[in-house]
Image: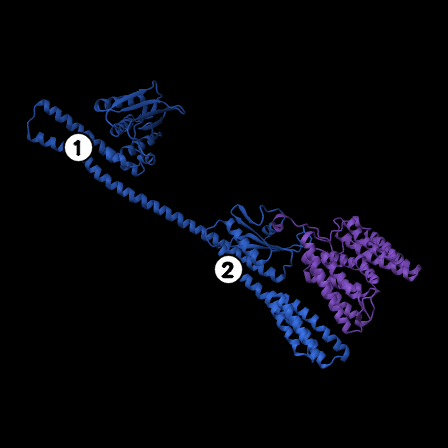
Chain colours: A blue, B purple
Amino acid sequence: MALAIALTLAGITALIAVSEAGVASLWRHAYHVPVVLAALRWGSGGALAALAAILLYTPFVLPALERAGPSRAVLEALVTLALLLGVGVSSGALAAGGRRQRARYEALVAIQRAVDGDAPLDIVLVRLRACLEARLGGLVGLAVRDGDRLALAGAAALAPGSPVAQVLGSGAPLYVSDLGGGVRPRRCFVAPLAGRGGITGALALERPGDIGADERRALLALATHLGLALENARLAARQRRFAEELAEKVTAATRHIVEMDRMKSDFVAIASHELRTPLTALQGFSELLATRRFAPSDLARVGAIMHAETERLGRIVADFLDLARLERGLAPPLRRTRVDAGVVVSEAVEVLRRARTTHALELFCDAPLPPVDADPDALDRVVKNLVGNAVKYSPAGSRVRVAARPHAASPAVEITVEDEGPGIAEADLTRVFEPYYRTPGGARVAAGAGLGLAVVKSLVDAHGGTIRAENVAPHGTRMTLILPALS
Amino acid sequence: MRALEYAPSPLRPRLLEATPLPALVALAAGWGLAALTLPAPAARGIGLAAAHGGLLGTALAWTAADGARERWAPLEAALVLGVATLFAHLVPGGVVAYAAVPSWLVWRRADWRRGGAEHARAMLAGALFGLLLGLHLLVNASLTLGFHVRPGRPADLLAWLAYDLGANVLAAEAFFRAGLFARAHRRWPFAAAAAVSTAASVTRYLLDPLLPHTPEILAGAAFYLALLGVGNCWLLARHGSLAGPVAAGLLFFAAYRLLAR
């Protein structure tokens, strides 16, 4: 383009030189074409092209002026020179202004694009810096307050007393005509980024060339827009995060409700079955008692069976009541007293050993154990539940080890129940204590309402103790219960 | 980025700060004394040395890291220039003595250029600018004012070239561009700084006793020297090296030396 303009200027000069009209040649007006083209292409280049045209045309004008004085042709030529200068400067200024305006609009669009999306603030600032440097023609720096920290683009750290630090402190724009540190002066203009809550950051432009008053005003407007865009982006991001968190919570709650609903349905079916079994037995034996006569020995046997079934029914109903309290967030009622846990464990194991002859129940009880503040009935229920589960979910003939010992790390009693069953999947180890929850494998092996361990946990919690389930090698499950000792 | 990483120096030198006034006053006094007591040719030689030395020394003091240490630089420069002028006038081929001035500047560590490719680009751009302006001067002056191109004796042209390189152009560009313009540009926009620098340099040449003082010559000189001044300011601002302005000035004055009535 520059070569084409230079050649055009030279060509027009040659045409004037060969023209008979000389200085009055109409070709002189053709100088305006390359001058305007240069102005449109480079802005201030229009003035340079006009200067070149004037320099090329003056060798025709000055001799004519010297020869003929201020004739009409010479005056017209002088007007042409003035026009060339005026057209070059003004069209160049207009083109440059238009280009700057376009660059500003492009910068606004680029800012919107840069701040759009979910990217973190530091990434957004890097993007902003790249797009602004391309449009503003200089080094761009950004500092934006992000909570307690200051996010920066253009430097690793902000030096105290630097122009940007000054603007962040004062909130007023700052123009530095020379930052120093170079052969050529480096101009710098820093505009504050204003948000709804005051000054949120600063935008700095630094370059060796001038930063005129017009450009500084434009930068101030750009900084205002940038500050609002960043704040809007921050608010939008916060809203998005909030909406996402809310959606996640709603999804999780819905999933939980669906599962609870399914488990409750399962529970109703299982509970009906569990209740029906002793009820059926009671119903059958009571009908027999009403319709037949029995020998005294048979009467005692039937009575014992009915008593056992009634106890079973009572346990189930007690579990339901405990669960109901648990779901209302209430602790089970306890009658706490000073208890020797070893005695309670031994008695419970002894009872179960007599009742369950399919498994070898082994008891390891250290003596003496520190006394605990517990409800003996609740503790008995806990131990029987844990041992009953161990028997229920391990193969016949296997061993179930029950141990009670002082806890090594704290003044407490540790009771473990260990079986040789198939174990529990890792994902289910914590869930087995949830109400209604039954492991997929457990549901196939034995019947149950899924309440036992939930009730156990609520009882242990009420005592201020802990309980955990873990798998043991090579296979089996260990339930560890820790009850705080009396101080 | 300096706007984030450095605090700008709160002390910005004033436009005429670190001017070596005692040395300049001494030079002016010496010049005056010479004009009163010595024959005209000797007084003119001393005047040239004092004027160019004053410009060079002041530029050196303005651009030095510690201006106070250069307070006698104008006297040194004038001495070097005086010796060179003496050699040029008394010894055949003595014009080469003007090479002592750039050598003295190098010895004094005057850093008015950037190294490497930028230095070469500046020199090339300056040479092109000076050549175009000089050619225009030759064409325009030969069409008007009764001037024509007359190469003259090569020895004379070489002498002028040496004088321009060692005294005229070097001193003017060092003072008006590296000194005055660079200082003004650190505080004002380019247009204002270039206007100050150019106005000062044009005034300096219009007052030069070597320039014929006819209205048309003065008008032409003002026109071309203004163009040369603005162009050289732009070259210095663009490239940061004084090599461009010096090359432009040398070629322009070389063209000027070819003109004769």
Which amino acid, mark 1? Pro
Distance (Cα) linking label 2 and label 1:
77 Å
Q: Nearer the viewer, residue A229 or B71?
A: B71
Secondary structure under the numbered disc 1 in the rendered image = helix
Q: Nearer the viewer, residue A323 or B106?
A: B106
Q: Tell me the quadrant of the picture where the C terminus of chain A can be found.
A: top left
Q: Is residue A193 toward the left or the right of residue A29 in the image?
A: left
Q: Residue furthest top?
A: A367
Which-is-in-front pick, marks 2 and 1? 2
Q: Is residue A399 toward the left or the right of residue A74 in the image?
A: left
Q: Is residue A53 toward the left or the right of residue A292 in the image?
A: right
Q: Nearer the viewer, residue B129 or A339?
A: B129
Q: Nearer the viewer, residue A113 or A222?
A: A113
Q: Which residue is the site of mark 2?
A: A109
Which of the 4 image quadrants contains residue B191?
Answer: bottom right
Residue A379 in picture, x, y percent from top left = 29, 27
- Chain bearing tag 2 is A
The disc at residue A278 is: 1
Could one spot residue A156 in this view of the protein?
Answer: yes
